């Protein structure tokens, strides 16, 4: 289930694309499949990264122009050099993070001038209903800690070096599903109505029937659970490069051993799942697993 629309977020051959907060891999794997690019998934959850790896393996290709990497890291302290990526996806992440401004600052740092950014967060009014129906919904470990106003978030991102160019909504059919889960939170696993609705969503995802696909497109502007916004990073004001750095002195994003980027911050050396290189060849990570 994709939230990003690649028609609004086009990939170009050779792009380095980061899925920041990749979770179990839905976007980073689709980025890899969508074009001849380097797809990099980063998440704080080691367990989710292992799931991403397992889900990726059936799609691995021995194609030199495709590469796939996974890395465990803190989104507020990313282990990548400045201007490392052509495009960045951050989907359904910011609502989980206390210091989301730190995440936005890191995105601005590592995205190249002229690069594209896709941000998605839960839409405010469907999210408010979930919070009203269930305190547990937003009090579980790793759950949502804030409700974003989409327009305010857009203005906050635009105050950086970003130009907004497109917005849409997604997953209208999922809003009623989550309302039901919140209403019957303690018995949701046994509730027959929730089970039936879940089967409908799975059928829609796997078969993509015209009826539900068309219905969701019509309902997204009204009921869409997620708001999706796209930005382009502008050229920053000209300033002298910092000592040992600067746009013109940074090395390219390459793999050295198990590192995705040759410029690592010493405070972000974390346990790393096996990486994938050259279209799916599993890299070696010594002593991390």
Image (cartoon, helix red, strand yellow):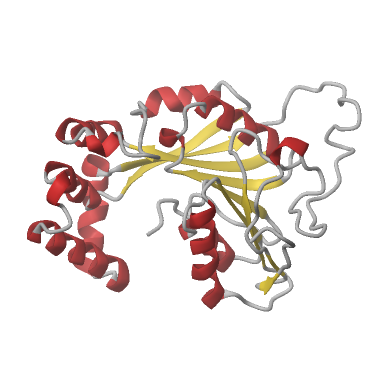
* Left or right for 8, reference 160: left
Asked where in the image residue 222 lies, by quadrant, the reply is: top left
Count of all numbered marks drawn on residues in the image: 0
Rendering coords of residue 110 (x, y %): 69, 38
Q: Can residue 195 be seen in the rendering of this structure?
A: yes
Q: Please give the name of the residue rendered at 86% of the width and 46% of the height, measured from the top-left corner.
A: 251
Q: x, y percentage for residue 163?
A: 56, 31
Q: Residue at x 35, y 35 (%)?
A: 144
- The one nearer the camera, 191 or 18, is 191
Q: Work out whether 38 lies above or below 158.
A: below
Front residue of 153/140: it is: 140
**In the foreground, 137 or 228:** 137
Quarter location, residue 59: bottom right
Quadrant, the C terminus: bottom right
| Residue at the image position 18 percent from the left and 48 percent from the top | 181
Query: How far across and how far down the image is residue 281, in percent?
Result: 69, 74
Please identify the quarter of the rendering in which residue 272 is found.
bottom right
Residue 274 on image: x %, y %: 65, 64
The answer to whether one can see residue 111 in this image is no
Residue at horizontal 59 percent and vertical 45 percent from the top: 88
Front residue of 246 and 138 = 138
The quarter of the image holding the N terminus is bottom left
């Amino acid at each position: 289930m994709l939230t990003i629309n690649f028609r609004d977020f086009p990939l170009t051959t050779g792009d380095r694309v980061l899925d920041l907060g990749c979770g179990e891999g839905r976007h980073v794997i689709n980025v890899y499949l969508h074009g001849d690019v380097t797809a990099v998934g980063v998440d704080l959850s080691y367990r989710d990264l292992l799931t991403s790896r397992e889900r990726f393996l059936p799609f691995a290709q021995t194609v030199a122009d495709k590469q796939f990497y996974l890395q465990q890291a803190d989104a507020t302290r990313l282990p990548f050099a400045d201007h490392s990526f052509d495009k960045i996806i951050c989907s359904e992440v910011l609502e989980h993070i206390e210091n989301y401004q730190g995440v936005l600052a890191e995105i601005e740092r590592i995205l190249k001038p002229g690069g594209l950014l896709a941000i998605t967060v839960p839409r405010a009014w469907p999210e408010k209903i979930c919070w009203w129906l269930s305190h547990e919904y937003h009090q579980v470990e790793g759950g949502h800690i804030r409700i974003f106003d989409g327009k305010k978030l857009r203005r906050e991102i635009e105050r950086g070096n970003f130009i907004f160019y497109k917005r849409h909504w997604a997953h209208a059919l999922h809003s009623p599903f989550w309302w039901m889960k919140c209403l019957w939170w303690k018995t949701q696993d046994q509730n027959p109505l929730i089970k039936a609705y879940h089967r409908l969503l799975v059928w829609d995802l796997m078969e993509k029937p015209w009826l539900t696909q068309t219905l969701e497109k019509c309902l997204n502007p009204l009921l869409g659970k997620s708001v999706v916004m796209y930005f382009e990073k502008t050229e920053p004001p000209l300033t002298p490069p910092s000592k040992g750095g600067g746009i013109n002195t940074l090395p390219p994003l390459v793999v050295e051993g198990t590192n995705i980027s040759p410029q690592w911050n010493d405070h972000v050396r974390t346990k790393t799942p096996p990486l994938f290189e050259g279209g799916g060849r599993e890299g070696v990570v010594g002593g991390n697993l």
